[in-house]
């Protein structure tokens, strides 16, 4: 065989393998994520509070092309009021179905599991509680609850809530679990997160956060442990040109029903309103689709 002929065959086989590889990539349906500055996954015995970068995770049911998204990696320019400037939703997040990274050990049963306890000192230490908050630690309860991720698997979440509503909150999330309502993550918000520059891509379901009502000087219902913000990216808050999270503009179209959205007449609204809670999606300004509260604020 001549050297020229040999080079031709080598080139042909190279092109064939490149074509096969391209077909395999094009057929993928994975959306990957890396989380920055959050807790390392926990063993069954303990939860680490050391912030480290996350490894990529992949959801089992996410449609669309192969994509990657690094959470918290791209700070947004700020508005004069300190919030981030709203941007169009990135393609990887338009139909957001990122898989859950386990911070607590997953449930040991397929049935709903929950615990209610006083707030352990180490949990209080990594929360946003401080002496100026409108509630004392003994007025709060630490809940762990099963939830379904967008990967259709069972996970364990954690929240701090007011002791007066602890049983009610567990009952609501038991209904969400039974209905298969997906939640991306459910963990306690840290003080450090409140000071980070806005990136507009968070989606943590949370309850107690010791902060004032956005744009006001009064304490929010979350600061009393009397509110839940459910899948905030899938259910943003909007007032004029302020959108929170700032990259969630695609989800202002409530007629395009996607997984994880809180919709009027849907399981989430029905469960909370049956328990006597109010939904921020019925407000006029802001319209707060993520927000449920026991006191209507």
Image (cartoon, rainbow, N blue to C red):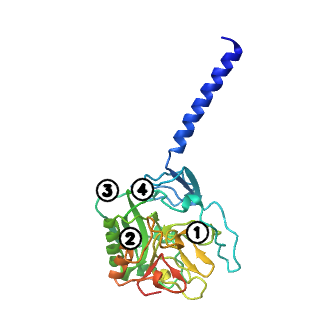
Does the rendering let one see residue 36? no
Q: Nearer the viewer, residue 124 or 184?
A: 184
Residue 55: % across, % down: 54, 51
Which residue is denoted by mark 4 in the rendering? Answer: 151
Q: Nearer the viewer, residue 7 or 61?
A: 7
Name which residue lies at 49% across and 85% down: 283
Classed neighbour count for the residue bearing mark 4: other residues with Cα under 10 Å, few (<14), some (14–19), many (≥20) = some
Name which residue lies at 69% across and 12% down: 2
Residue 251: % across, % down: 52, 70
Which residue is denoted by mark 3 in the rendering? Answer: 108
Which residue is denoted by mark 2 in the rendering? Answer: 143
Mark closer to the chain start, 2 or 3: 3
Residue 254: % across, % down: 48, 73
Classed neighbour count for the residue bearing mark 1: other residues with Cα under 10 Å, few (<14), some (14–19), many (≥20) = few
Q: CA distance from mark 4 to mark 2?
A: 22 Å
Q: Nearer the viewer, mark 4 or mark 1?
A: 4
Q: CA distance from mark 4 to mark 1?
A: 25 Å
- Where 189 falls versus 276 (above or below)? above
- Where 50 falls versus 247 (above or below)? above
Residue 15: % across, % down: 62, 30
Mark closer to the chain start, 1 or 3: 3
Which residue is denoted by mark 1 in the rendering? Answer: 193
Image quadrant assignment for residue 94: bottom right
């Amino acid at each position: 065989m001549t050297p020229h002929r040999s080079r031709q065959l080598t080139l042909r086989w190279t092109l064939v393998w490149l074509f096969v590889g391209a077909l395999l990539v094009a057929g993928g349906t994975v959306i990957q994520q890396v989380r920055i500055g959050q807790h390392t996954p926990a063993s069954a015995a303990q939860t680490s509070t050391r912030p480290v970068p996350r490894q990529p995770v992949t959801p089992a049911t996410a449609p669309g092309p192969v994509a990657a998204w690094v959470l918290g990696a791209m700070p947004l320019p700020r508005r004069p009021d300190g919030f981030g400037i709203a941007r169009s939703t990135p393609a990887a997040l338009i139909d957001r179905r990122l898989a859950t990274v386990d911070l607590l050990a997953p449930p040991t049963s397929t049935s709903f599991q929950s615990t209610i306890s006083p707030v352990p000192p180490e949990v209080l230490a990594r929360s946003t509680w401080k002496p100026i908050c409108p509630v004392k630690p003994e007025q709060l309860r630490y809940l762990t609850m099963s939830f379904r991720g967008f990967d259709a698997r069972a996970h364990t979440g954690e929240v701090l809530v007011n002791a007066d509503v602890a049983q009610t909150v567990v009952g609501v999330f038991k209904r969400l679990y039974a209905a298969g309502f997906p939640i991306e993550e459910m963990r306690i918000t840290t003080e450090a997160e409140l000071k980070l520059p806005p990136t507009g891509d968070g989606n943590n379901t949370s309850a107690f956060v010791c902060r004032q009502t956005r744009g006001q000087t009064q304490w929010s219902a979350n600061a009393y442990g009397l509110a839940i913000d459910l899948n905030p990216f899938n259910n943003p808050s909007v007032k004029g040109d302020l959108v929170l999270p700032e990259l969630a503009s695609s989800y202002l179209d409530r007629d395009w029903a996607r997984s994880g959205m809180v919709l009027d007449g849907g399981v989430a609204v029905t469960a909370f309103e049956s328990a006597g809670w109010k939904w921020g999606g019925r407000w006029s300004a802001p319209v707060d689709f993520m927000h449920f509260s026991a006191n209507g604020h």
